Amino acid sequence: MPVYRIHHSTTYRHGAAAAMAWQSLRLQPRREASQECLEFDLEINPRPADLSVRTDYFGNTQHVFTVRAVHREFSIQAHSLVRREEPARPARHAAPTAAAAAEAVDLEILQGDFSLEQFRHPSPLVPALPAVDSLTGAVDPALPLLEWMDALGAVFSRTFRFDSTATLVSTPLEEVLRLRRGVCQDFAHLYLAGARSLGLAAAYVSGYLLTQPPPGRPRFIGADAMHAWVSVHVPGAGWVDYDPTNRCFAGSGHIVVARGRDYADVSPTRGVFNGGGAQTLYLGVTVEPEPESAS
């Protein structure tokens, strides 16, 4: 079972002195059936005056703290050691069709699993978009659900281009549809809109992706980044994760940090500063496999 060591660095540099900072973090990898967080450590500078840890509504670990020291630079270093195995998922032909899955979700909700309802409807960053119907309409809902998921991923790979400069966190989905380009967050949100338009329960997943260097080249420190994909509820089998950016089902290299309705529920860092003027944000993520003997 692979073990990964992850270093996530976040640094804010202010144009003027900031007197205080209030921050909320979701950086600790989740404990799930196919994943275990073996170690987690936070280094915060300046040191916080208080730090509390809680589990949010979606089961994610949330760290909340206040910095009261006057500062021009503020940094958060998160260190994790995670054991991750290949997630179990049903055989493609064993799953119900996409249309039947949507009907089965209705039944599960009526029988008392009300938590599924929140993942079927528009959320703050995933509005109902009629233009998405042209994407989902190209995929036959009579396909088994896992085949439907991958077929929708194929539509995405033909329609959209990954471009790290095309969008911002605040770019609305309508603009992504117009540009036909974006980043993993955009593609996850669009995929959610498509799955929900069919009546499926679909969630946003934030985490890390182990990227491989070109053959013969060493790993680049900081080359990895925070990644996003989706999770679709398969009636009778549970949640199955799919990565629309890479057109693949999530595997042992997809390390889950948080789950929610969209990015607004799982933002890795969120907060406000008192003063500071203009600020520049620096991010860096490194995901490295641990030698087997160290696990």
Image (cartoon, helix red, strand yellow):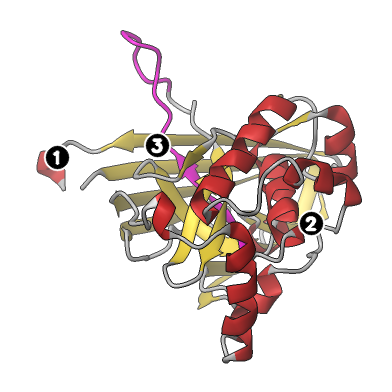
Q: Which mark, by number, is residue 126?
A: 2
At label 3, the amino acid type is: Val
Q: Is residue 160 visible?
A: no
Given residues 17 and 159, the one toward you in this image is 159
Q: CA distance from mark 1 to mark 3?
A: 15 Å
Q: Position of residue 95 (x, y in %)?
A: 45, 60
| Amino acid type assigned to the residue bearing label 2 in the image | Val
Q: Label 3 vs label 2: CA separation?
A: 29 Å
Mark closer to the chain start, 3 or 2 = 2
Looking at the image, which residue is at 64% across and 62% down? 99
Report crowding for label 2: few under 14, some 14 to 19, many 20 or more residues within 10 A (C-alpha): many
Q: Dividing the picture into quarters, in which one does residue 273 lie?
A: bottom right
* Quarter of the rendering containing residue 263: bottom right
Instruction: Magenta stretch: give its range.
Output: 202-220
Q: Are marks 1 and 3 in contact (CB under 8 Å)?
A: no
92 to the left or right of 54? left
Could you tell me residue 46's position as x and y percent? Answer: 58, 53
**Closer to the camera, 240 or 57?**
240
The residue singled out by tag 3 in the image is 287
Asked whether, in this view, residue 198 is left or right of residue 175, the answer is: left
Vertical order, 96 against 7 (above or below): below
Give residue 290's position: percent from left, percent from top: 23, 38
In the figure, 165 relative to 277: above or below? above
In what element is the residue under mark 2?
loop
Name the residue located 81 percent from the left edge and 63 percent from the top edge.
124
The residue carrying pointer 3 sits among few (fewer than 14), some (14 to 19) or many (20 or more) residues within 10 Å by Cα, namely: many
Question: What residue is disc 1 on?
Answer: 292
Looking at the rendered structure, the secondary structure element under dot 1 is helix
